[in-house]
Amino acid sequence: MKLEVNINNIEETEQLAEILGPLISGGTVMLLKGDLGAGKTTFAQCVGITLGVRRRMSSPTFNIIKSYNAENFVLHHMDCYRLENSDEDLGFDEYFNEQDVSIIEWPGFIEEFLPDEYLSVTIEKTAGDGRLFTLESNGAKYDSVLEALQNVIPSD
Ligand SMILES: Nc1ncnc2c1ncn2[C@@H]1O[C@H](COP(=O)(O)OP(=O)(O)OP(=O)(O)O)[C@@H](O)[C@H]1O
Ligand SMILES: [Mg+2]
């Protein structure tokens, strides 16, 4: 399933995160795609807040993986940009488990390590602070997430 959401400003990005957050449960893997500066880290931070992360989530570009305690699970925030042209396995299997949640920027650089099922979120810049969010589900669990999201999202 595929769902497009037009965002006009950063407040609406926060609102989308607030709607998506409660639909995220342990075992969820969310891929964040889009160009440099599209808003992947910003969206991950907004989602983290809705999940109960109290620490500030800084960009994991240098560390690649940062883990946070959320209310009901551990949240792994990854930025795989620095793994371009590398096939290094940082032990991804251990992160993509049934309990934890992972949010992954630049997932294309760890394609061989990704699980079969995930929620993919592509962010594209439109005018000004506008963004087009395209959410795509890969797997039945994520179809349900997008169906639920579609039912609560304010339509344009
Ligand atoms: N509607 C919006 N949603 C998200 N970010 C926005 C929006 N409007 C403006 N911005 C700004 O765009 C920038 C996005 O930067 P961010 O670090 O989140 O991008 P990124 O996709 O993670 O980039 P990188 O590929 O370098 O990791 C921030 O400065 C943010 O304030
Ligand atoms: Mg980023």
Image (cartoon, rainbow, N blue to C red):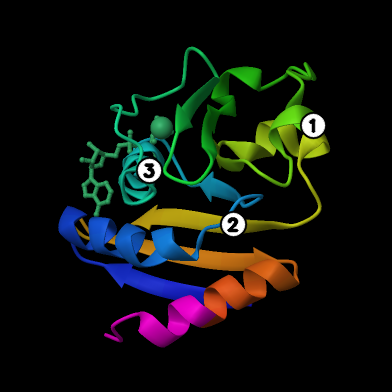
For the point 26% across and 85% down, which residue is it? Answer: 156
Towards the viewer: 113 or 67: 67
Please rate how many residues cluster around mark 1, counting C-alpha atoms within 10 Å: few if below 14, some from 14 to 19, many from 20: few
Figure quadrant, ligand 2: top left
> Of the residues tagged 3 and 2, which is closer to the observer?
3
**Residue 122 at x, y = what percent?**
50, 56
Residue flagged by tag 3: what amino acid is it? Gly
Q: CA distance from mark 2 to mark 1?
A: 18 Å
Q: CA distance from mark 3 to mark 2?
A: 17 Å
For the point 52% across and 47% down, which residue is it? Answer: 33
**Residue at label 1?**
93
Q: Secondary structure at mark 1?
A: helix
Image position of 10 (left or right of 112): left
Image position of 24 (left or right of 152): right
**Residue at label 3?**
48
Question: Is residue 149 rendered magenta in the image?
Answer: yes
